[in-house]
């Protein structure tokens, strides 16, 4: 109420200021001089009258000098008769310019309206406007409980043809499409339509795209909403939005409700320090109730996506709520090639591009990563004033995505360049010398991101299982740069710090997680606990004694020591080959796979 009163006072103040401004800038109109009738007769006799306007008994006289005057005549007789009675000759009366006006019936009312009522109407309009604003704010407060779900635009229809790979996942979801298209076929046999489908996978694997594809294939409305949009600072708003969402969806059935980032609202209840967020838990409880409340013939399916299924409340995952739990893996080499074909459709590119070679170099890339890679390649081509992008643009874009942009301004000194060249040559030489290591695709000493150089070794085919011999080869390759620096320069630099950290972490996992230590045997050590409210691990429980801890350290040191001996032995035996690779790197700064293979085959 205080705000309303203040707004009204401000409105009055503005009106008074405007009225004052108008009074300053608008000059009042000059009113005609009132004269007696005998003066008017003298003016006529002197031939000074230009025009006479007659309105009943009122005469408005316009003189030849531009001035105006007013007078009254006899109401019983006309002006002509009156002038004759006053001795005005007929010739002068005939030359007079006379104008007879009809009296305005509403003139007085208009004058009253403009002078009195109009200001009150303006003030009334301001008051109405202020009340409307206040009412709008109140209505907005009441609309907090309404769902913020958005209905997908039918023009942007997505089908399974727009989703590359994920064959098994699409087969699983085709049943959902059939349920939505022909529910009677399943209801007649007594089957219940699945109420929920949970899509689980790493970020960028296509969870949202698949949900849209299901709606596109089924030809049904698609309501989508993020989990974080349910929860507000006001208690009960989230639960109200859930109710409104499901009510709206049931009116549009058959349809799909898609909830992205379900873990934002579906985290385990009662977890975290001091208990959970009451508002979030109320929202989760309402989701559980609504999914239980689906009737047998309700054609509404909830599809949710998350990349943290480990933190979801168990009540969400039980049958009857999210009946189907579909896992989306990262694409393999053939799927990556298919994804690349989709993303380059609407772009201009060199027809000689080999997407298979790009797919070979991108293990671990998700669909979103590959889309970003193609876009970066197009940007690089546009920056280079080229009309299309080529194979090299894709390679450069991949390195930019993995390592960051080239730091061309970071010019290495001659000594630093030499150390970096031998360091990367050491990695490459060890990788090429061990049969269990992945082949080398590229070596570079051009700084990128936070690295001064890199050796890119990639697997020939995607792996699901890794052997101990493969891990031991990776350890030796990681220490190849360290060993090369020590043998060639007899001094170590900080350039090997990241290699040592990666190698040490791998050696510890071999012992504590993979059971690959001959001395400690098939057992895991340590139990990592996560606090759900933080979403990251903050504690590791040591379920072993101090004696075992010392043995773990000893085994980690043993793995590291053996890897270093392997690397040092290869570099010592193939010192000439190391020199060839390093010198070529100092000249060209980059060695591709084909050239590197030739260097290794040369005598």
Image (cartoon, rainbow, N blue to C red):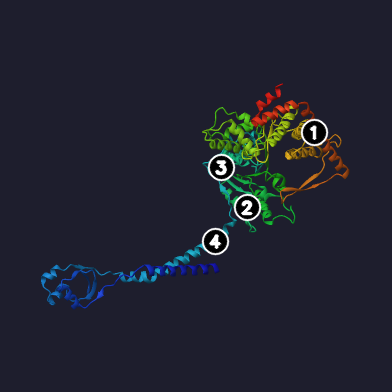
Instruction: Give above or below for 102 relative to 552.
Output: below
Quarter of the image where one finds residue 344: top right
Question: Residue 72, image x and y in percent?
Answer: 22, 76
**Outermost residue, left direction?**
90
Question: Residue 105, image x and y in percent?
Answer: 28, 69
Q: Which mark is residue 230?
A: 2
Give left or right: position of 346 versus 324: left
Of tags 1 and 4, which is closer to the observer?
Answer: 1
The tag earlier along the polypeptide, 1 or 4, is 4
Q: Secondary structure at mark 3?
A: loop
Instruction: Give above or below for 230 relative to 24.
Output: above
The residue singled out by tag 1 in the image is 564
Between residue 65 and residue 601, name the one nearer to us.
Answer: 601
The tag earlier along the polypeptide, 3 or 2, is 3
The residue singled out by tag 4 in the image is 137
Q: Residue at x 85, y 39 (%)?
A: 554
């Amino acid at each position: 109420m205080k705000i309303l009163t203040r707004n009204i006072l401000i409105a009055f103040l503005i009106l008074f200021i405007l009225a004052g401004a108008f009074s300053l800038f608008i000059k009042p109109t000059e009113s005609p001089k009132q004269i007696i009738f005998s003066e008017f007769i003298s003016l006529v006799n002197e031939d000074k009258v230009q025009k006479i306007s007659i309105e009943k008994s009122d005469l408005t006289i316009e003189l030849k000098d531009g001035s105006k005057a007013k007078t009254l005549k006899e109401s019983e007789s006309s002006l002509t008769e009156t002038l004759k009675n006053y001795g005005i000759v007929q010739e002068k009366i005939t030359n007079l310019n006379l104008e007879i006006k009809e009296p305005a019936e509403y003139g007085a009312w208009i004058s009253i309206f403009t002078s009195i009522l109009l200001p009150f109407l303006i003030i009334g309009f301001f008051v109405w406007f202020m009340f409307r604003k206040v009412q709008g704010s109140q209505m907005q407060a009441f609309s907090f409980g309404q769902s913020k779900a958005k209905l997908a635009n039918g023009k942007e229809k997505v089908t399974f043809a727009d989703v590359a790979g994920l064959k098994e996942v699409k087969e699983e979801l085709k049943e959902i499409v059939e349920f939505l298209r022909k529910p009677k076929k399943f209801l007649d046999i007594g089957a219940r339509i699945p109420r929920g489908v949970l899509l689980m996978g790493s970020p960028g694997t296509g969870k949202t795209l698949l949900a849209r594809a299901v709606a596109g294939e089924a030809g049904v409305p698609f309501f989508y909403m993020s989990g974080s949009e349910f929860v507000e600072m006001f208690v009960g708003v989230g639960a109200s939005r859930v109710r409104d969402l499901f009510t709206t969806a049931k009116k549009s059935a058959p349809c799909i409700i898609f909830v992205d980032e379900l873990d934002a609202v579906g985290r385990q209840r009662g977890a975290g320090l001091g208990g959970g967020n009451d508002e979030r838990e109320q929202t989760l409880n309402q989701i559980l109730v609504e999914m239980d409340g689906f009737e047998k013939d309700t054609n509404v399916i909830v599809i949710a996506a998350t990349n943290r299924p480990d933190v979801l409340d168990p009540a969400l995952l039980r049958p009857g709520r999210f009946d189907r739990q579909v896992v989306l893996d990262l694409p393999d080499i053939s799927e990556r090639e298919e994804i690349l074909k989709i993303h380059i459709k609407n772009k201009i590119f060199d027809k000689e591009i080999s997407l298979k070679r790009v797919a070979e170099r991108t293990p671990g890339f998700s669909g979103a990563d590959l889309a970003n890679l193609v876009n970066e390649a197009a940007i690089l081509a546009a920056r280079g004033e080229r009309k299309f992008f080529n194979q090299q643009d894709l390679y450069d874009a991949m390195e930019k995505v993995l390592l960051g942009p080239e730091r061309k301004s970071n010019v290495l000194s001659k000594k630093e360049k030499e150390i970096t060249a031998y360091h990367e040559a050491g990695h490459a030489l060890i990788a090429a010398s061990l049969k269990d290591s992945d082949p080398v695709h590229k070596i570079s000493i051009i700084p990128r991101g936070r690295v001064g150089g890199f050796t890119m070794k990639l697997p020939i085919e995607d792996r699901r299982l890794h052997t101990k011999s493969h891990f031991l080869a990776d350890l030796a390759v990681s220490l190849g740069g360290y060993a090369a620096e020590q043998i060639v320069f007899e001094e170590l630099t900080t350039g090997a710090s990241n290699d040592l950290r990666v190698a040490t972490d791998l050696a510890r996992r071999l012992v504590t997680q993979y059971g690959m230590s001959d001395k400690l045997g098939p057992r895991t050590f340590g139990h990592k606990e996560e606090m759900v409210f933080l979403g990251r691990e903050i504690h590791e429980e040591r379920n072993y004694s101090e004696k075992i801890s010392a043995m773990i350290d000893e085994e980690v040191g043993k793995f590291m020591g053996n890897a270093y001996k392997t690397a040092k032995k290869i570099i010592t035996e193939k010192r000439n080959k190391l020199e060839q690779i390093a010198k070529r790197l100092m000249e060209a700064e980059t060695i591709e796979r084909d050239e590197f293979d030739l260097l290794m085959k040369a005598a």
